[in-house]
Amino acid sequence: MKLIDIEKLLRWAYCEELIKDKPQRTGPAPVKSAWASVGSFAELLTRVDDNRYGVLPDLDSEGEPHPDAVCVHHAVARLDGRGIVLSRKWNPMPELMKFESYADQALDQARSVLVRTGANGVPVLRQSLSVLVRKVAVLGHAPDGAGECPELKALTGANGAPIGFREVVEHSVGPFGEVREFAYEVDDGWDARRKGLKPGAYFKFQLSPDPIPVLVERGEFALYRMALDELAENLRGKLSEFEPVATRRSWRPWDGGMGADWSGGVFGRILKGVNSAEVT
């Protein structure tokens, strides 16, 4: 029995063995639209044809996929049947919290990119976990979440000058003599000549650079890292020639790997429940 790192096992399965699976057709080839092929390309960033394992088949290969590789694929596919728990305390960038409401808004938007509300109000991943694992195996690159904490900066225009906002209140008389008040916001509150705000004007701020892409990538890494542990555990003792070894990847590669298991309180029990979901 050969010991093998779980990520090396995944790469071997999807890049060397499962590509040997030839398209099986018993009748005329189905007619596909051009957009159908584009959709498959976008899913794995590689052309996925009729290979049932989601990889481009090598038509020149000889033999059949190794049984261990097929077993690996089935274990990966079963990841999609696991429950999802996305903690409301999830925050892979704690230093962001000094920005208070701006941080809360960024975290909420990152959550909405990672998770959506499915049938019956059950939260589900927007990107299938099995697709994430296969994509990393094929491309050989896992999300690393690299990125610095942003700064809070005033909104600026195309010329780089800050944008000043002010509220304008107008009044009108209704058909029965009643006074109506209308308030709206305009963006002419910056006095370019005086290099300052007009009376009553104010700035609006935003986090720069936008932290949402980094937050999402760190969330995807947490999912991927947890999936690796799940696969190593589920495949142990199930293969004929290989024995998977748990990954030694850090839980926090973006800050030098400080800290141990980072799953608790992040995605909680995302791989533990079966067909269940909970938001805490």
Image (cartoon, helix red, strand yellow):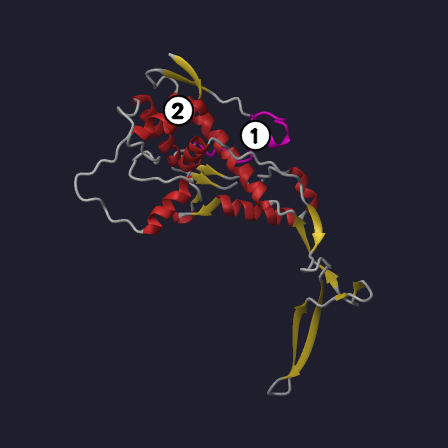
State which tag comes first along the sequence, 2 or 1. 2
Label placed on residue 262: 1
Q: Is residue 195 magenta?
A: no
Reply above or below: 134 against 112: above
Task: Write down the quadrant of residue 173 in the picture.
Answer: bottom right
Q: Quadrant of the N terminus?
A: top left
Q: Which residues are magenta?
A: 250-272
Residue at point 46% right, 47% down? 116
Q: Viewer-nearest of labels 2 and 1? A: 2
Residue at the (67%, 41%) spot, across then down: 149
The residue shown at (70%, 60%) is 159
Which SS class for mark 1? loop
In the displayed image of the protein, which residue is found farthest to the front? 60
Question: Between residues 165 and 31, which one lies in front from this camera angle?
Answer: 31
**Residue type, numbered disc 2:** Trp
Query: Quick one: label 1, few (<14), some, or many (20+) residues within 10 Å?
Result: some
Please state which of residues 121 and 206 is positioned toward the viewer in this rendering.
206
Residue 20 spot, x, y in % from top left: 30, 28
Q: Name the kind of residue labelled 1 in the image.
A: Trp
Describe the element under mark 2 as helix, strand or loop. helix
Looking at the image, which residue sits at the far bottom? 176
Residue 271 counted in the magenta span? yes
What residue sits right under mark 2 in the picture? Answer: 12
Kindly report the secondary structure that dominates the magenta region of the rendered protein. loop
Vertical placement of residue 11 versus 280, above or below:
above
The residue most toward the right is: 194
Nearest the viewer among 109 and 14 is 14
